[in-house]
């Protein structure tokens, strides 16, 4: 007797091999039979109707650290076929973390990942300090598999306190961090994450940025003891510095025998040679035996915001950014103050240049006639400037109007397609679980098929491999990513002709009624996690809690 029997599937097994027709049988959370016509009965039988039957998708760059504590299903990841998520990226994780450092780390999450107060305040009970206790808070309570990273910034905070964001570590402090990292790896961490670009709520560097190379090398040595991954956010705004980071990662990879990965790598018309130069250096280092995987997301970034909450859109506009951080009454007073108003306009439009604001679209407004239109178009009609119009509309709508900066980076699919098809590129960087009121960070998997498989840049089989077998190998998840007898039964059934990025929707499902933006699923039919039905297009989310700590 099978627990689940999937019939009439177009099996794409995650290796990149050609698809084949057949059935798939699951017993006790494992794949018992893959392919052929299976005879027998099952507690649950699914007719795939010639849809693709693939391994569950793996998302290697998320920030579900907090969300999983109040949303066991990591919505809407399962809807998009994702069965395993890696969180703890960008040097940030919720453990190891002493109680006195919690407010500081939460503010970093809020600054870097644009998570609102509702994602933390009252959303869950802090019942841990160690990484092991954090993992135990998740174990048995989650519907997706989790492969957590330990963040470099919390490691420094634990060992160095306030000095973590002031100076380099001493030899003794580095030794303490090494031992702390071993504890994290023993508890189930799949690696370490660090960042060279992120800033805290005061726009000061996060603790990981104060680490000298000797510290990172020592921590990489510990990763080498376990064969675990180092994840890095490099200075992606500079090609030359990114090249230096690729070389540095290569040396760490070779010295300690570890896989390394960096994200993001964008194709942009503003730096047309960036991708070719970085990929040439990556190929050079792979030829030496190093493993330096660039993470490339499939879609452009769409950033939406209102003036009521600080947004990454204003990172290059310090005056706007600081005004946004004011409490609501002071913010409205500042926008109505003639001097502050003029200062904001002058900062946004030096010399009358308005391009950055002119292209912003109206995403949400009380006035339906404004929706989808740009500030530049409306400003011209009203005889004003885009920045002045943004202030006026925000005041008129009591800060409720939202703006959208669409298609940032990855503008040309004809350039991005060959990049994604490159065997040295790791598909990732969805940022799911972060920026939840700013831009929808889901739909990468559907976008991969709808844009790049349909566009002829990748075969169906290679696209599946890119989000299943490849990340399982890179991240050291040996029983996932493939449809083979004996492997964990993580399975996604989807229609390759209709799978897509989905439509962005506002959803009021956060603690205390907070709102976030998600993308609904399109073309995904059934998702199975460790042999249990987790989501289906017909029935929605199941009550399953079959997710595991993928390295624990």
Image (spheres, rainbow, N blue to C red):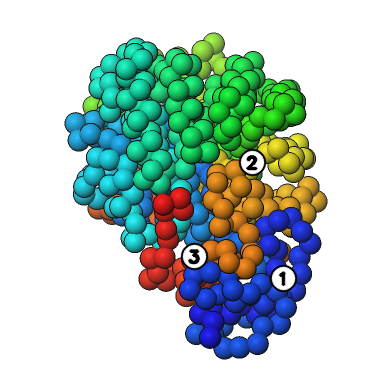
Above or below residue 95? Residue 175 is above
Give the crowd class for mark 1: few <14, some 14-19, many >=20 residues within 10 Å: many
Residue 387, how many percent across, how many down? Answer: 47, 25
Quadrant of residue 406 within the rendered picture: top right
Query: Which residue reaches farthest front?
Result: 225
Label 2, label 1: how far apart the Cα atoms are: 25 Å
Helix, strand or loop at label 1? It is strand
Residue 411, how many percent across, how many down? Answer: 68, 36
Residue toward you, 475 or 185: 185
The residue lying at 25 percent from left, 19 percent from top is: 162
Label 2, label 3: how far apart the Cα atoms are: 23 Å
The residue singled out by tag 1 in the image is 10
The residue singled out by tag 2 in the image is 426
The residue singled out by tag 3 in the image is 529
The residue lying at 58 percent from left, 35 percent from top is: 259
The disc, 2 or 3, on the residue closer to the chain's N-terminal end is 2
Label 1, label 3: how far apart the Cα atoms are: 19 Å
The residue lying at 55 percent from left, 75 percent from top is: 26
Residue toward you, 399 or 52: 52
Residue 368, how many percent across, how many down? Answer: 47, 50
Above or below residue 250? Residue 45 is below
């Amino acid at each position: 007797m099978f627990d689940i029997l999937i019939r009439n599937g177009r099996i794409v097994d995650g290796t990149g091999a050609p698809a084949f027709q057949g059935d798939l049988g699951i017993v006790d959370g494992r794949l018992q039979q893959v392919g052929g016509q299976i005879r027998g009965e099952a507690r649950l039988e699914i007719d795939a109707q010639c849809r693709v039957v693939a391994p569950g998708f793996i998302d290697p760059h998320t920030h579900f650290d907090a969300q999983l504590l109040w949303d066991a299903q990591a919505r809407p990841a399962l809807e998009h076929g994702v069965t395993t998520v890696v969180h703890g990226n960008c040097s940030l994780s919720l453990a190891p973390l002493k109680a006195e450092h919690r407010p500081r780390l939460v503010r970093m999450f809020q600054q870097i990942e644009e998570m609102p107060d509702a994602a933390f305040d009252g959303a869950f009970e802090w019942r841990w300090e160690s990484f092991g206790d954090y993992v135990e808070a998740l174990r048995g309570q989650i519907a997706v598999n989790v492969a957590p990273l330990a963040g470099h910034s919390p490691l420094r905070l634990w060992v160095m306190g306030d000095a973590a964001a002031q100076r380099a570590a001493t030899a003794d402090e580095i030794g303490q961090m090494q031992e702390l990292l071993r504890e994290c790896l023993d508890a189930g961490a799949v690696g370490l994450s660090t960042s060279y670009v992120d800033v805290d709520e005061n726009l000061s560097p996060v603790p990981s940025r104060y680490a000298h190379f000797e510290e990172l090398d020592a921590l990489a040595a510990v990763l080498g003891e376990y064969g675990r991954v180092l994840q890095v956010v490099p200075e992606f705004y500079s090609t030359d510095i990114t090249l230096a980071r690729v070389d540095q990662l290569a040396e760490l990879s070779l010295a300690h025998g570890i896989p390394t990965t960096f994200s993001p790598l964008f194709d942009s018309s503003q730096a047309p040679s960036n991708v070719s130069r970085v990929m040439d250096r990556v190929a050079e280092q792979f030829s030496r035996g190093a493993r330096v995987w660039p993470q490339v997301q499939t879609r452009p970034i769409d950033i939406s915001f209102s003036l009521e909450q600080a947004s990454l859109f204003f990172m290059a506009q310090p005056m706007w950014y600081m005004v946004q951080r004011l409490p609501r009454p002071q913010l409205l007073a500042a926008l109505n103050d003639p001097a502050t108003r003029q200062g904001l306009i002058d900062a946004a439009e030096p010399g009358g240049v308005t391009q950055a604001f002119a292209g912003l679209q109206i995403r949400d407004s009380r006035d339906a006639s404004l929706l989808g239109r740009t500030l530049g178009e409306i400003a011209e009609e009203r005889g004003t400037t885009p920045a002045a119009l943004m202030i006026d509309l925000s005041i008129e709508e009591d800060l409720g109007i939202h703006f959208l900066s669409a298609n940032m980076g990855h503008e040309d699919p004809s350039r991005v397609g060959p990049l994604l098809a490159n065997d040295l590129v790791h598909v990732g960087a969805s940022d799911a679980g972060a920026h939840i009121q700013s831009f929808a960070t889901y739909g990468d998997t559907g976008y991969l098929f709808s844009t790049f498989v349909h566009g002829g840049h990748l075969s169906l089989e290679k696209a599946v491999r890119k989000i299943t077998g490849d990340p399982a190998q890179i991240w050291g998840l040996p029983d996932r990513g493939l449809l083979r007898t004996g492997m964990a039964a993580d399975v996604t059934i989807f229609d390759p002709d209709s799978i897509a990025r989905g439509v962005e929707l506002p959803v009021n499902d956060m603690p205390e009624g907070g709102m976030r933006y998600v993308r609904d699923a399109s073309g995904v039919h059934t998702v199975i996690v460790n042999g249990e039905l987790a989501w289906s297009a017909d029935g929605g989310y199941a009550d399953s809690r079959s997710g595991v700590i993928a390295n624990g």
